[in-house]
């Protein structure tokens, strides 16, 4: 009797060994290490602001012998009555400070103006090197 030859098919075939490396555990370990690295990096606590050189703003309003910087009740800045932005005010104060004879900068905040805006404006004036500075209009608030 002849021998019956069994041909392999998908049901009786032997599994062949897999030749590729399983990289899933490797990727898992790398992701865990990446997360640990991110958590170990300290957050910046002390940040130092650095003014980078740029195109200096030019003053758009004239600089007089006495200039009034005012803040109204809506926290809008003005230079001698003309509305200005903080960057424009910085340019005006810088131009005034650069003059040989430093003009008087008079500061007149409204009673309802924000204290924060007033403090920032005074700091801006100081940063630009103003030599002559005065508060005006305080006599209006002497009687509450």
Image: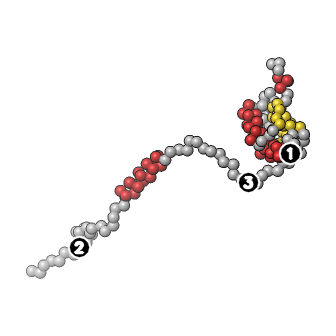
What is the secondary structure assignment of the residue under circle 2?
Answer: loop
- The residue at the point 74 percent across, 31 percent down is 115
Residue 13 relative to residue 88: left or right: left
Crowd class of label 2 (few under 14; some 14 to 19; many from 20; radius 10 Å): few
Residue 31 against residue 7 in the figure, above or below: above
Residue carrying label 2: 8
What is the secondary structure assignment of the residue under circle 3?
Answer: loop
Residue 15 against residue 61 in the figure, above or below: below
**Image location of residue 64, percent across then percent down:** 90, 41
**Image location of residue 50, percent across then percent down:** 66, 48
**Image location of residue 121, percent across then percent down:** 76, 37
Residue at the extreme front: 100
Residue 88 against residue 21 in the figure, above or below: above
| Foreground residue among 55 and 21 | 55
Question: Which labelled disc corresponds to residue 100?
Answer: 1
Q: Nearer the viewer, mark 3 or mark 2?
A: 3
Colour theme = secondary structure
What is the secondary structure assignment of the residue under circle 1?
Answer: loop
Asked if labels 2 and 1 touch by Cβ distance under 8 angstroms, the answer is: no
- The residue at the point 56 percent across, 41 percent down is 45
Q: Nearer the viewer, mark 3 or mark 1?
A: 1
- The residue at the point 23 percent across, 69 percent down is 14
Residue 59 relative to residue 43: left or right: right
Q: Mark 1 and mark 2: span between their CA atoms?
A: 102 Å
Crowd class of label 3 (few under 14; some 14 to 19; many from 20; radius 10 Å): few
Q: Identify the mark nearer the N-term, 3 or 1.
A: 3
Question: Which labelled disc corresponds to residue 74?
Answer: none
Q: Quadrant of residue 106?
A: top right
The answer to whether residue 119 shows anywhere in this view is yes
Q: Identify the mark nearer the N-term, 1 or 2.
A: 2
């Amino acid at each position: 009797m002849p021998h019956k030859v069994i041909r392999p098919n998908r049901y009786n075939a032997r599994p062949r060994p897999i030749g590729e490396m399983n990289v899933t555990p490797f990727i898992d370990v790398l992701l865990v290490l990446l997360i640990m690295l991110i958590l170990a990096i300290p957050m910046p606590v002390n940040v130092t602001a650095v003014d980078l050189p740029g195109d200096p703003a030019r003053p758009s309003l004239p600089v007089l012998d006495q200039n009034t910087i005012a803040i109204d009740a809506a926290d809008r800045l003005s230079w001698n009555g003309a509305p200005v932005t903080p960057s424009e005010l910085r340019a005006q104060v810088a131009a005034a400070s650069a003059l040989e004879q430093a003009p008087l900068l008079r500061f007149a905040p409204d009673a309802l103006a924000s204290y924060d805006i007033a403090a920032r404006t005074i700091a801006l004036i100081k940063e630009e090197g103003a030599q002559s500075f005065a508060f005006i209009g305080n006599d209006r608030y002497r009687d509450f």
